[in-house]
Structure formats: structure tokens, C-alpha cells
Image (spheres, grey):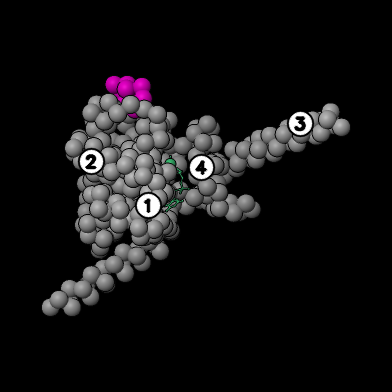
Amino acid sequence: AAKESGRNRFSYFTSQLQTAALARMRLTSELRTAIAEQQLEVHFQAIVSLASGTIDKAEALIRWQHPQLGMISPVEFIPIAESCGLITQIGDYVFQQALLWIKKWRSRYQSQFQISINQSPMEFQSDTTRYLNWVQQLHQQGLPGQAICIEITEGLLLDASTKISQKLGQLRDAGIQVALDDFGTGYSSLSYLKKFKIDYLKIDQSFIRNLSSDESDLALSEAIIVMAHKLGLKVVAEGVESASQSEILSAAGCDFAQGYLFAKPMPAEQFEMLLQQQQKNSGLRQNCSN
Ligand code: C2E
Ligand code: MG
Ligand code: MG
Ligand code: MG
């Protein structure tokens, strides 16, 4: 009987592996078509200034609207895109979509509005002229580099290569800002914070989740905020879902917050309605004080 169940467990395991491998193969072969047929869609999530309560920035987050499988998470297909050489194509698409909206949102709603774009390590290291090309496209639209922010992760800074610091310098020279995403989860040393030119730390949502009940998470978040400020960086808290988290972060001096408490990621047209709403409300406030 033991032998029997052992074999069953084994075949269960292999069949699970097979299913996973098959699913991956399917997605790999379909991703190319997805790009061509515009099944990829960029959503935007609000980033709120805790001091003013206004939406000052947005993060662009890619989604795959698969005709049969429905919405596929980037967590699933970004690694596939990396391994089959499609990641820069996806990144360029996200940039193009951001470019399409940022001009309008800056001119109509918030003149300093900024869109954050995630760059996977492989993509960041790829081509040296790529970001210069982005800058050129921004300028052609009359937009400064500050209109976008590049989000990278700590892993990229691990090897401390001069190529990476050169590229970060290039971005800085062009006015493009840089955020360190998922900060605190990357097993890297803090020394890179003085070596590399970075503008924002994004505290990972795993520290925010239990902020109101877990004293060590609170201590770590407060310490990150103090450290960042001493180094001249601004802080964004990720995954803020409750008012109490937001209040704690505000009290700790955190600059920005992002999370379901404020807004989920949503299509551009819908995001624009948030900006519109905000403008109306601030108009109302102004009228009242008159
Ligand atoms: P990320 O850059 O850390 O993005 C934040 C993730 O947290 C997003 O997941 C967002 O939907 C989710 N999130 C935001 N607020 C909350 C909240 O209050 N609670 C919870 N539980 N989650 C929240 P998403 O959109 O599934 O993206 C996952 C990851 O995929 C991103 O993590 C990023 O690493 C990657 N990604 C997304 N879009 C792109 C892209 O265009 N290019 C690259 N290279 N990676 C991308
Ligand atoms: Mg991000
Ligand atoms: Mg993150
Ligand atoms: Mg992440």
C-alpha cells in the first residue's frame, strides 16, 4: 500500500510538473501573438502624496488580456517574456502607452505628474541607447525627463557594475528619476544606496501588510523612512490597504503611498476619471473658502 501511494504521489507530482511546463510552453508561444494582436494592456495605479492627499504619480502595470484564459498576471508572463527575448518590446510598449497619456494628464490635471515604469533587470541592462531614445521621444512631445520614473529592483545593484552606474547616471543627466522597487526584500547591502543615484525607495508591501499590528514591521518602516530622508531620497509605501496603515505612514513622515485604499490599477480612461474627480473636488474646496 505504501508503495502504491508513493507511486501515486510521484505520478501526481510529475503530472503537476507537466501541467506547469505545458502552461508555460503555451504562454511562451502565444506571447508573441499577444503583442502583435494588442492583447497587452497597460493599467495605471495612483500614487498619492501623503502630505497633500493628491494623486501626484501613477505606476504603469502591464496586463495580458488573453482571449481564452482571461487576465494573466505580469508575475506569470514577465519571466517568460524575459526568457524568450520579448521583454524590451513589452517595456517599449509600456513606455509608448505612458507617453500617450502623460502629456494630457500634465497639461490638464497636474503639471508635475509622473508615470513610473517597471524595468526588469535584464531589460535594464540590455541596450545603452534605449533610454536616450525614450528621452528623445519625451522631448519631441515637449516633456521633460521628470515625466517618467524607472522602477528597478535591488538585485540589479548587487554586482555594482560600472555599466549599471553609468546607465543610472545617464538617466539622471536626462532628468529621468529612478525608484528602487520592493525595497527591503532583495538581500543586498545598503552600501549601494550611496554608490548609485536613486530618487525613491518603495517600501515593499510585505512590510506594510501588518504595519498596525507588527512592531518590527513598524520599526523597519520607520527606520527606512529616516534613512532614506537622510540620504536625500523620497519614500513610497506599497500595498497600503487600510486607513490605519496610511495614518501610521503619514505620522512616520512617509512621502507617498500606493495601494487599494486609494485605488486599484485600472485602464487609462478610468484613471483619468480619478484625476478629473480630484480636480472637481479641489475646485469645490476653493469655492467654499471664498
Ligand atoms: P510591483 O512593481 O511591485 O507592482 C506592485 C504590485 O502590487 C502590482 O501587482 C499591484 O497591482 C499590486 N498592488 C498594488 N496595491 C496593492 C495593495 O494594496 N494590495 C496588494 N495585495 N497588492 C497591491 P501586479 O500589477 O500584479 O504586478 C506584479 C509585478 O509585475 C510588479 O510588481 C512588477 O514587478 C511586475 N510588472 C508589472 N508590470 C510590469 C512591466 O510593465 N514591466 C516589468 N518588467 N515588470 C512589470
Ligand atoms: Mg513597481
Ligand atoms: Mg513593488
Ligand atoms: Mg514586485
- What's the CA distance linking mark 4 and mark 3? 28 Å
- What's the CA distance linking mark 1 and mark 4? 27 Å
Label 1 or label 4, whichever lies nearer to me, is 1
x and y percentages locating residue 120 in the rendered image: 42, 35
The three-letter code of the residue at mark 2 reads: Val
Asked whether 283 falls inside the magenta stretch, the response is: no
Q: Which residue is mark 2?
A: 226
Specify start and end residues of the magenta stretch as a single range.
Answer: 157-165
Considering only order in the chain, which callout, 3 or 4, is on the residue closer to the N terminus?
3
Left or right of 40 in this view: 152: left
Q: Residues within 10 Å of mark 3 (few under 14, many from 20)?
A: few
Evaluate if marks 3 and 2 touch, with contact meaning CB atoms under 8 Å apart: no
Q: Quadrant of residue 139?
A: top left
x and y percentages locating residue 243 in the rendered image: 35, 60
User: From the image, which quarter does the N terminus lie in?
Assistant: top right
Q: Quadrant of residue 119?
A: top left
